[in-house]
Amino acid sequence: MNVAWAIFKKELRIYFVSPLAYVFLGVFLCLAGVFFYMGVVQTGEASLRVMLGNLSVTLLFLLPMLTMGHFAEERRAGTFEFMMTAPVPLWALLAGKWGASFALCLMLLAGTALFPGILAYYGDPDWGVVFTSYLGLLFCCGAFVAAGLFTSSLTDEPVAAGLGGVIVLLPFWISGTAAEMVDWEQGREILRHLSFLTHLEPFTRGVVDSAHVLWFVLFTFLFLFLTWRSVESRRWR
Amino acid sequence: MISAQSITKRFGNFVAVDSVSFEVAPGEILGFIGPNGAGKTTTMRMLTGFLPASEGRAVVAGHDVFDEPMKVRRKVGYLPEKPPLYNDLTIGAYLDFVAEIRGIDRSKRVRRVGEVMDQVGLIGWEHRILGSLSKGYRQRVGLAQAVIHDPQVLILDEPTSGLDPGQVAGIRAYIRGLAADRTVILSTHILPEVERLCERVVVIADGKVAADESIHSLKNRVGAGVRFRVELKPSEADQGRVPQIVGALPGVDQVRPHDEVDGFAILDVRAAEDPRTAIARVATERGWTVRAMERHDPSLEEAFLAVIGQE
């Protein structure tokens, strides 16, 4: 546990001593502002639905850039060899790295708290919906970070890892749109369930359904498991 | 303390390390030498558990590397060929992180990091960013990282590469000090370093152990007898006949012309016993000029080249 904590702190420190975290915060908050404005002006509602929906897609593209260095960079710098010869269990390494990226996501989302604040000042938002929407977005973050970790474990090239993360995640976004173009009933259902938007949507309506929570949790653990296997197997080759 | 038992590493069809066996006793510094690509680093990686061996087993600090990797990892300090540094961190933050991973309590960590920084000559550098360091300093941080938990076993892959001569002397003295109550494997291609630090060497070539013996006995492998370097300027009449004449002297086994400088023939003479008096006598009789005659002990370098078959 201490080891996972040490790795968590180290990863966060690396985020904040390099410009990466600040660039992320900046870009993310700018986009959030644009989406917020669009959402409120278009719908005229005191609602965050448009902003949070758009942010989830933004995260799909941004988070792999945040996680791409995790294994790829360590391998390039030779620190991977250190990690694998120090008394660091693999689960602690994964937990520390996933946790650090997830914590940065928390900070990104905390930054957008400004917007519900504005809504509260001028209108009367439904706080339950705001809360569940953020919860849904957090589940998204956890899942995307896990997928990003996985692609980072596949290559020594951080950029390839980042793009790979986007490529792995893309089908889970567009399958929702693709579903509407399919005639076959079962196929449409399957595609719909593959899309994270399908599972995020209830959250933005204020509904926390355990089935959708489970989808995100399984998604996250599936990719963490794949990462585990990939890191293990690369030592055997 | 360290025991490699027929460890083999294959990458596909390529055999990088082929059934390598050796032992290192507690308190010993073993020199691990070999040409580039001979399998040194791969062997080190198997001993530290970074790479699993394809065959054979390795026991380090009393534990099988494959069966009890965590126990081995706790007791081993390892400096890989490329110092494992996080370029964005400061030296202080990095060493603190390593100490934390190594399970050193928060209360003792600051003191221990300070101690180690002092030992490797990094005092006053704790706020420097690792990415901005020169090779020599990176190497020192790498060494600090390897010893921070006071390991019983140290595996060092080229610890002095990139250091200037002053730093090299300091780090060597430090390694020698460390070895007093530890087991050290030192992989290097700097042979004088091995001679200064190690009693015994394992020479590895083409993935196999080519020699495993004391430096003294390794040097004797170069050939029997004693060798001399002789510089002579022959008389007009004997021009070009010097090797034959010297070679005909009693006790001389072999004469090899080495070079010719300023009209002096420089010869390598190998003889069962000291031939210098005899050479001096011949030179006087024939009117040659003698500039130098010196005993020439075989160097580790020659022994090394002889062992790996590249004389």
Image: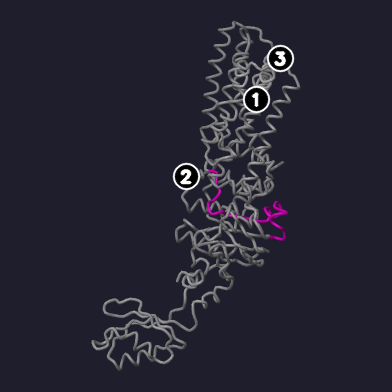
- To which residue does mark 1 refer? A140
At label 2, counting other C-alpha atoms closer than 10 Å, the crowd grade (few under 14, some 14-19, many 20 or more) is few
**Residue B35 falls within the magenta-colored stretch:** no
The residue shown at (55%, 11%) is A38
Toward the top, the furthest residue is A44
Q: CA distance from mark 1 to mark 3?
A: 16 Å
At label 3, counting other C-alpha atoms closer than 10 Å, the crowd grade (few under 14, some 14-19, many 20 or more) is some
Toward the left, the furthest residue is B236
- Chain hosting mark 1: A
- To which residue does mark 3 refer? A206
Q: Amino acid at mark 2?
A: Ser
**Quarter of the image holding residue B147?**
bottom right
The correct choice, above or below, for B156 with respect to A196 in the image is below
- Chain hosting mark 2: B
Residue B81: % across, % down = 53, 54
Residue B235: % across, % down = 25, 87
Q: Which residues are magenta?
A: B58-86
The correct choice, above or below, for B109 with respect to B26 in the image is above
Q: Amino acid at mark 3?
A: Gly
Residue A224: % across, % down = 67, 35
Residue A156: % across, % down = 54, 42
Upstream in sequence: badge 1 or badge 3: 1
The circle on residue B132 is 2
